Amino acid sequence: MAGARLDRMIAIERFTGTKSPLGGTKKTWPEYMKAWASVTPVSDGERFRADAASATITDRFVINWNAKAALITVKDRISYGGRYYDIHGIKEIGRRHRLEISATAVAK
C-alpha cells in the first residue's frame, strides 16, 4: 500500500445546503479539493429490495495526507469516473503519510 501509484485524479465534494428565495433548501456538492489517488476495486454486489435491484461498487482510494485532506469526513463524497461515491471509512496510513478512503457508488 505504501508504494501505491497515485495516478488517478479524484475530487472530494462537500455537501452544502443553502436557503432558496422561496424558503426551501438548495442542495449542492461543491468541490472541496482534488487529489491524486490510487484506486483499488474492493467489491461489487447486487441488492434486491422490494422487487428492485441495485448494484453497488466499493472502491478503496489512497491519497497523500495533507492538512486539507485530514478534514475529509464521511459526510463528504468522492467524484471519480463519472460516479459519486459515498465515503464510509477513512484511516490514516503511517503518521501523516497517506489516507485510505473506502467508498461505495451505485453502478450505472
Image (cartoon, rainbow, N blue to C red):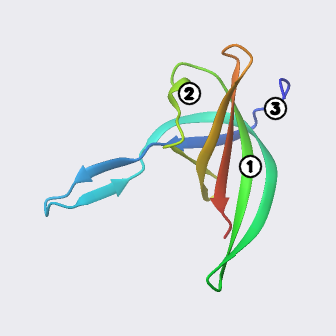
Q: What numbered label is drawn on residue 59?
A: 1
Regarding mark 2 in the picture, which secondary structure is present there? Answer: helix
Nearer to us of marks 3 and 1 is 1
- Residue 101 can be seen, yes or no: yes
Q: Residue 77, position in %: x, y?
A: 54, 47
Horizontally, is 81 left or right of 46 in the view? left
Where is the C terminus found, in terms of image quarters? Answer: bottom right
Q: Kindly check if marks 2 and 3 are in contact, taking CB atoms under 8 A apart as contact.
A: no
Task: Give coordinates of residue 18: x percent, y percent.
Answer: 25, 50
Q: Nearer the viewer, mark 2 or mark 3?
A: 2
Q: Residue furthest bottom?
A: 51
Check the image and report above or below for 90 versus 76.
above
Disc 2 to disc 1, how far (Cα)? 18 Å
Neighbourhood count class around disc 2 (C-alpha, 10 Å): few under 14, some 14–19, many 20 upward = some
Give the number of the disc on residue 40.
none
Rendering coords of residue 73 (x, y %)? 52, 36
Which residue is identified by label 3? 5
Left or right position of 71 against 43: left
For label 1, the SS is: strand
Q: Is residue 11 left or right of residue 5?
A: left
Query: Upstream in the sequence, badge 3 or badge 1?
Result: 3
Gap between marks 3 and 1 measured at Cα: 15 Å
Give the residue at x 53% y 33%.
Answer: 72
Seen in the picture, residue 98 relative to 37 is either above or below; the reply is above
Q: Amino acid at mark 2?
A: Ala
The type of residue carrying mark 1 is Asp
Q: In the figure, is residue 71 to the left or right of 101?
A: left
Residue assigned mark 2: 69
Q: Specify whether residue 81 is in view.
A: no
Residue positioned most to the top: 95
Tell me the quarter of the picture where residue 55 sits. Answer: bottom right
